[in-house]
Amino acid sequence: MATPTPARSLPAMGDPFHLSLLRTPRGRFRVSLPPGGEFLLGTPEPLSRPGAAGQSFCIPITEMVGVQLGGSGSSPTVEGNQFTVFFVQREKRQRWSLGSLEFTVAPGSGLAPRWVDALQRSIQLHGVTRPRKLLVFVNPVGGRCRAGEIYRDRVAGLFALAGIQTEVIETQRPHEARELILQQDLGDLDGLVCVGGDGTFNELMHALISRTQRKAGIPEDNPAAPLLPPRLRIGIIPAGSTDCICFATVGTNDPVTSALHIIIGDSQPLDVCSVHHHERLLRYAVSLVGYGFYGDVVSDSERHRWMGPMRYDFSGFKAVLCNRSYEGTVEFLTAGGTEANPRDQTRCRAGCLVCSESSHQLLGGSEEEKLPQQESTGAAVSEWQREQGRFLAINLTCMSSACPKSPDGLSPSAHLADGTADLILVRECSALGFLRHLSRHMDHRDQFDLPFVSVHRVRALRFTPKQLEGSEERERPGCRGWKGLLQGLCWGEQPLSSWSCDGETLPHADISVRVHGQLIHLFARGIEQKMGLV
């Protein structure tokens, strides 16, 4: 609510305070830009008219997309008695839209261009994190093959309105974006944007991390090497099959919402897992590193790409019926501390205190430097543990991995940027029992409150599978009576599963994983706690 101020005309430029009586579609308002220029305030005039008190507005300059002379439906003009302010407007379910408010000044007053200039200078002053030049990669074959249309119809105009210079590349072949990022001069860019799904984002992320390490002379194949965070942020315009990473960091898979987060320069740090096979880097991951069920689903779904996004449901159905488990040894370095509890019912949201504390530790260099010491000394705050047996699923995630089908995700209390990952171990059980575990991902019940499920907050992981060479196929719980049905779907006992790393199948089953705290930054702010309308 704006505080009423005695009306006066707009002072000369350079005065720290601007105030005018302006007309809007809502009526006449006393509009002011107070000292510091952090908010554009409006109070109805006269304040005594019915309902006037509830019509005041306050538009944060940090959430102002742009300002132009003329009306919202017209092209910018040089002269005239109107100007329009465009800003972020919050909708339901974490969605943002482009709001606009037209102002009309007194004819011949010359106030319109002066207001535009004052607001543009305030945007520049308070928008130091806003991107000015972006390299945009559009994946035309991702998801439902609508990435190009989504960018042209819903995003490009917003970037132009905000004055962002863009270079748009529509990729024509696999790994084209990676090659360009590794070879091209990126010195004048403020960020990269991918228009596609999780696979497109992963290609940009891998290339950007690799480029940064190569320039710094850091060997990526060394599992113990501390990695250097890239300078550039990555923006995600969702246009893929799942868009899990966008959903978990923004709260919705809406292209306009993501574009507005990019425009206002939001920055969300993100933990990244490096996955190695001995002394060789296999991949980086931010969402899910999964063995067993999810590995089988991703591997099988590649045989049915012609089905589109439905292939994941089909392969998931097969994997549940087959109910395969795999034997091996899981070793993990616990995060330690009373606050490191993946079942504490907290949620990582915008301004998360847990992630902020981790930021302070990383600034002091403690996160990367402490890990080797903890491994060698077995300090009380963090120690290596081991579990052996047969597992239906081994899942490691640096975030909740929420998506529209699973609003709480694989681990609802996982944090985006605390330097840890949540390890979920699902031991051998009946197909019905595992189905109960999966169903709880979709109905807000505790998916960990089952006797065959355990969850740990960790900083590192090692997995060694046990080969089942020469062993006889044995009947597992839940398979009795299903053999006729399963014969056409399952391939019999398999000694090894595959690791799925953010949707990509890895060639090795024995791997080591390490969490790198806040290695990359996205144009996002995390999921907001509360929503309101301007």
Image: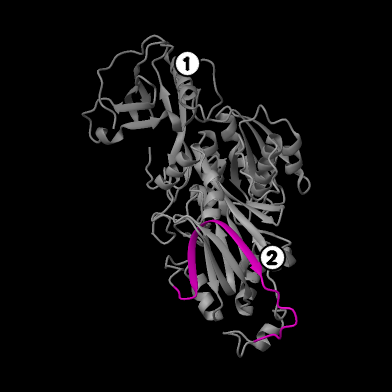
Residue hosting label 1:
113
Q: Which mark is residue 509?
A: 2
- The residue at the far front in this view is 377
Q: Amino acid at mark 2?
A: Ala
Q: Is residue 470 magenta?
A: yes
Front residue (pair 263, 400): 400
Residue 161 point in image, percent of width and height: 56, 30
- The residue at the far bottom in this view is 481
Q: Secondary structure at mark 1?
A: helix
* Quarter in which the C terminus is drawn: top left
Report how far apart the C-alphas of labels 1 and 2 lie in the structure. 64 Å
Q: Is residue 114 left or right of residue 259?
A: left
Q: Is residue 435 left or right of residue 352?
A: right
The residue located at (70%, 43%) in the rendering is 219
Residue 398 can be seen in this image:
no
- The residue at the far top in this view is 12
Q: Secondary structure at mark 2?
A: loop
Front residue (pair 332, 164): 332
Stretch of the chain drawn in magenta: 450-474
